[in-house]
Amino acid sequence: MSGHNFFLDKSDPASWRALNGSALKVAEAAESAGLPKSVMELISVRISQLNRCAFCLDLHVPRAREAGVTDQQLDVLPAWRESAVFTDTERAALTIAEAATELGEPENLAAKMDTARTALTDAQYSALQWAAITMNAFNRVSILSRHPIRPRSSGSAAGTNSEE
């Protein structure tokens, strides 16, 4: 049936629930580690940019704003290294998000992760890696499923789509 979407999340609801369950545990770990929701949404947006997941961007950019990520941060996010508008924790989180998404050569990956680690506690370092892994999984489900983006009515908030 080419041309018709096959929604991976709908075809195997138990696996989808398990992925969502993992995401909830990761969110709990991040909160316990003292990572603000804004940092978690910031990395969700950056990972979705790298993976070109329109559905997840449509969901997480508004959530990032609601969590306190500024428009300026979102505007410069693809060039975050060249900007002074991110905290050390946010920079470490973005480093982990990009490293976990792109992987790359082992020695480069290790150097990036070592740099990020210096600004984080062990619990934050762990939670951010799990968050990046989980967000990459959500991106892949949405991309493979070709989840549609539905127009929002003006003034309506994001989050009406079925992710996380």
Image (tube, helix red, strand yellow):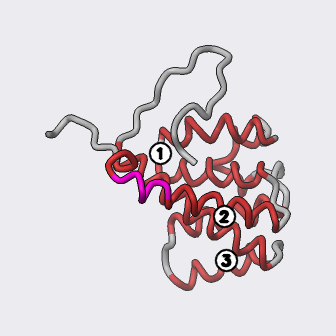
For image coordinates 63% across by 63% down, the residue present is 131
On the image, numbered disc 1 is attached to which residue?
A: 53
Residue 15's image quarter?
bottom left
Which secondary structure dominates the residues rendered in magenta? Answer: helix
Mark before the other along the chain sequence, 3 or 2: 2
Q: Is residue 102 above or below residue 86?
A: below
The kind of residue on which mark 3 rests is: Met
Q: Residues within 10 Å of mark 2 (few under 14, many from 20)?
A: many
Q: CA distance from mark 3 to mark 2?
A: 19 Å
Q: Nearer the viewer, mark 3 or mark 2?
A: 2
Residue 92's image quarter?
bottom right
Q: CA distance from mark 3 to mark 1?
A: 24 Å
For image coordinates 73% across by 54% down, the residue present is 82
Closest to the observer, 24 or 55: 24
On the image, numbered disc 3 is attached to which residue?
A: 113
For image coordinates 32% across by 49% down, the residue present is 11
Q: Which residues are magenta?
A: 12-17
Q: Nearer the viewer, mark 2 or mark 1?
A: 2
| Residue 19's disc number | none
On the image, numbered disc 2 is attached to which residue?
A: 26
Left or right position of 8 against 67: left
Closest to the observer, 6 or 135: 6
Q: Residues within 10 Å of mark 3 (few under 14, many from 20)?
A: many
